[in-house]
Image: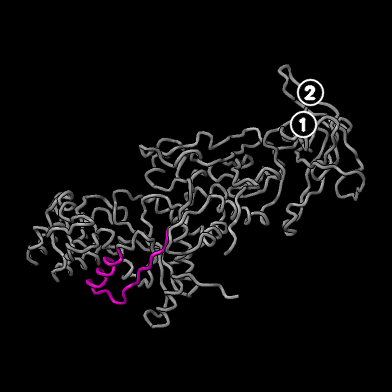
Amino acid sequence: MEKSKNFIEQAIDKDLSEGVYTTVHTRFPPEPNGYLHVGHAKSIILNSGIAKEYGGKFNLRFDDTNPTKEKSEFVDSIKADVEWLGAEWEDRLFFASDYFDKMYEYAVKLVKKGKAYVSDLSADEIREYRGTLTEPGKDDPYSTRSIEENLQLFEDMKAGKYEDGSKVLRARIDMASPNINMRDPIIYRIAHLTHQNTGDKWCIYPMYDFAHPLEDAIEGITHSLCTLEFEDHRPLYNWVVQECECPNPPRQIEFAKLYLNHVVTGKRYIKKLVEEHVVDGWDDPRLVSIAGLRRRGYTPESIRMFVELSGISKSQSTSDMGLLEYCVREDLKPKAKRLMAVLHPLKLIIDNYPEGQTEMLDAVNNPENEELGSRQIPFGRELYIEREDFMEEPPKKYFRLFPGNEVRLMHAYFVKCVGFDKDENGNITAVHCTYDPETKQGTGFSGRKVKGTIHWVKADTAVRVTARLYESLIDEEKEVYDEEGNVNVNPNSLELIDDCYVEPKLAEAKAYDSFQFVRNGFFVADAKDSKPGAPVFNRIVSLKSSFKLPTAQ
């Protein structure tokens, strides 16, 4: 069955069939003023995917027209994110600043055509003259300057003769336009700032709405795919490439953003959380920055699945975090080795097992994927089990360990609880069991049945590690932001477990290695805090969720 195409693919097919374009060339144009988040992943995957689908080209281009907020740290992080998501730009890495000379020439061209002029109005005055949604704007009193005067003033702006904010270059379009973006927008402003790429060469910088269409045109972009908030800017986009007489002008097509409920994506909010040490950086695993999701243990495949299931449309909608979690579960189920880890340990002593003896047991790494093979795990008299797997006085339908009950130890034997130890405060410190040597798993034992199976690790060979259990960064009973604009942070978003005991094999885990800790969830070795032989494990996601994948209509 042929896959149905979204509205962007349909538009591209029409353009190609009508000869508007002979090839497809897309780009992802981030501003290097912060880390990317999961919403940007949609644009990356869409733009690179369209190029690949049509055998075209894909550019990674940084819109670095605002040196106030831009840092090389952000450039490096964005490149890493785009590459990790599988978008291949090869040698097609560009910067808006690569074109500053060309953009200046285009601006001069507009001045010579009478399509741009230098204004001395302040920012507040420009806002006042612009009008409102219901009232037209008023002509700028400086719009009557001659072409010669404007050329000289613009050259003097470039030469650094004026202070920041004292003059701007405006496009001459229509102050009565119903689209406010067309009311003589600013296309150049003065800013005596050092640029990360061009240094102090420039003290005037193009505005985004002027620079962006020119970048697309210069690079030969055919389809400029952007989010819906740029729909009202499309007439200005088209005006710029038309009046600058760019050959083969690109076509802008807008699509709905990817919104995720109950998360923080705003750069200024994340910046504040970082600066106040609420999170430990832009890549904190509780954030939905792409770097944070990667560190949390999400895979590129899971994010691609999430984007695909969220869909490409012009209708704004919000996806559920449960859908993203569903995608990573589905991706990791067949990929991850299933090993045993005890998060909250309780000593279990098998009284009738020989003291000092260690037995190696076979364990399948993933019953859903034979290619992952098997491993051997040590077994002995003293083990650790999960504290919640024993109860002195259990409720009905509790099938784990309690006095007199028998369970299977995963990959091992049946054990029966015969007693337990308590300290002076009444806390249980150890559980005593006996084992039945005839019940070893894999020997074909077909006698009595047990209802419970629990996991374990051998006490003297288990490796002590740190595990982190994450919950939503946002207090689920509140909105994301309070009335003052602060983030409603969940004080219990992180549980740190320092005495987690794991199979010896897990001590070898390297950064980004992911596993299923049986019955506890999927975990990944933290890329920032893990050390050789001492990994720190982040829980990616629990094993089960109440989220249900929507059924197709």
Residue 447 image offset from top left, x and y in percent:
92, 45
Q: Quick check: can you spot residue 190? A: yes
Residue hosting label 1 = 394
SS of the residue at dot 1?
loop
Residue hosting label 2 = 421
Residue 148 image offset from top left, x and y in percent:
7, 66
Give the residue displayed 7% in from the left and 63% down from the top. Answer: 144
Quarter that holds the N terminus:
bottom right
Q: Is residue 229 magenta?
A: no
Q: Quick check: can you spot residue 155? A: no
Q: Is residue 246 magenta?
A: yes
When the figure is inspected, residue 476 is found, relative to residue 153, above or below; the finding is above
Give the residue displayed 40% in from the left and 54% down from the top. Answer: 75
Side (left or right) of 248 relative to 434: left
Side (left or right) of 469 relative to 426: left
Amino acid type, mark 2: Asp
Residue 422 — which label? none
What residue span does the magenta drawing correspond to? 233-256
Is 23 or 327 nearer to us in this picture? 327
